[in-house]
Image (spheres, coloured by chain):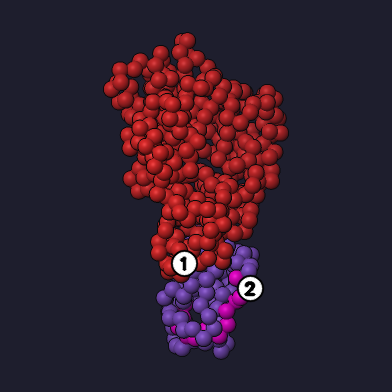
Amino acid sequence: MPVEFDSIRTEHAAVRESVGIFDVSHMSEIEVTGPDSTALMNRLTTNDVASLSSGEAQYACITREDGVILDDAVIYRLVDHDDHPAYLCIPNAGHDSQFTDWWQTHRDEWGLDATVDNTTEQWAMFAVQGPDSPALLAEEADESVTKIERFEHTTSQIADVDCIVARTGYTGEDGFEILCPTEAAETVWNAFDCQPCGLGARDTLRIEMGFLLSGQDFDPDDQPRTPYEAGVGFTVDLETDFLGRDALADQQETGTDQRFVGITLLERGVPREGYALVDGDGEQIGELTSGTMSPTLNEGVGLGYLDTAHTTAGKAVEIVVRGNRKQAKVTDVPFVSK
Amino acid sequence: MSFDVPDDLRYLESHEWTTIDGETVRIGISDFAQDELGDVVFVELPAVGDEINAEEAFGVVESIKAVSDLYAPISGEITAVNEDLFDQPELVNTDPFGEGWMLEVDPSDETELDALLSADEYREQIA
């Protein structure tokens, strides 16, 4: 996917006001089935996979023993395969081999009976997002797909191609994510007559919503964070027994030193990844991990980690931009209300 | 895609342009540069009276996707700054050689202009 097809502003506005399409085929796909598939999924992800029925999906983190997020993922429960639960796990780009190994190694270590396949090469994935996306889907897919609710999925033909269609996305708008066989990618892409969007708009849209970007807002090596620090504690079900559960149970008791927050720049400029957050005395109290000029608000907005004592919405902080301190404030996300 | 490269200007490899006639010269960034940057959202410029030095950074232009330093094609004292860019940075996109100009400078050594790229040389660079 290119950074932009037209301009980021044009693409961003299309998704906020009408509809746009993204090629997100870079996402990873891992399929898990077999008698112990639910147990394996539940022990490697933070949410309660057992609560899913066929046709439902959930957002979850993949954590390691110390509770640090390795990646975030959407997990679909598919129709049962040979009477056993089947799952499609979609972590971020470039993680497919790593997590296929991770799943298989833990399956063997725990003696579980499950098949784990890396099917990333078999799937293309498109996101059709925006308030007009249901109308567009109703034209190009079975009308029934517009009846599914958020985080549900179904199957449908699009341009005579069998697809999985989920009501999910990364933009904050109503929208759908469509999985189709790789060889039919062009056919399905061409079925949608709407604004093509690139990585640039994908980033500005998700930042306006306060959504995390894997490898940037958290990263096991460069930005090790737990779900509680990263503001996605809602993905953690401590009643399930997953890798990292004990560390997270402790942290839920003790609290976190820093928290993921939204920051609005009150002066001209653009907040960016890596900029320091300081208090009125110039003492560092945090760091931005993402930032942009919000195309919707025409304000500089950033996401990052701030010492917990400073995280009340409205609190004044300063962003250090190329050596200069600029006035900013803590802001509840999403920046753009939906 | 073809980009506008006015014949009567001189260029730096880093995509700034300068006029070459008159008491003062005017400086900005090229059509090619604004297209590469995409939507320009912020321009940081020095003040009138400040000195700039040829080939040294004098400011910053930011688009939604990138931060880029601005380099001086020539040395001299700044006599005017395009303050319209502070509220309308998108002028750099819509009219890079006109309303999107950045600085006017009183050159301290006009022979520096001889080292700059001609329009033809710059066209070749961005081809």
Three-letter code, disc 1: Gly
Q: Residue at x 55, y 40 (%)?
A: A170
Measuring from the top left, give residue A182's x and y in whole percent.
Answer: 50, 29
Q: Can residue A207 be seen in this view?
A: yes
Query: Left or right: A298 with respect to A68?
Result: right
Q: Do the residues labelled 1 and 2 touch (CB within 8 Å)?
A: no
Name above or below for residue A273 compared with residue A27.
below
Three-letter code, disc 2: Asp
Which residue occupies the foreground of this view, B109 or A302? A302
Query: Chain for mark 1?
Result: A
Residue A165: within the magenta? Answer: no
Query: Chain for mark 2?
Result: B
Measuring from the top left, give residue A291's x and y in whole percent.
Answer: 50, 55
Which residue occupies the foreground of this view, A44 or A123? A44
Q: Which residue is drawn at 56% across and 50% down?
A: A332
Q: Residue at x 67, y 36 (%)?
A: A133
Name above or below for residue A2 compared with residue B33.
above
In the rendered image, which residue does mark 1 sit on? A280
Which residue occupies the foreground of this view, A263 or A237? A237
Quick one: which chain is red?
A: A
* SS category of the residue bearing label 1: loop
Quadrant of the rendered structure where residue A241 is? Answer: top left
Q: Chain B, which colour?
A: purple
In the rendered image, which residue does mark 2 sit on? B84
Mark closer to the observer (1, 2): 1
Name above or below for residue B124 compared with residue A61.
below
Task: Magenta stretch: give its range.
Answer: B73-86
Name above or below for residue B43 compared with residue A221.
below
For label 1, the crowd category at 10 Å Cα-Cα, with few meaning under 14, some 14 to 19 and many 20 or more, is few
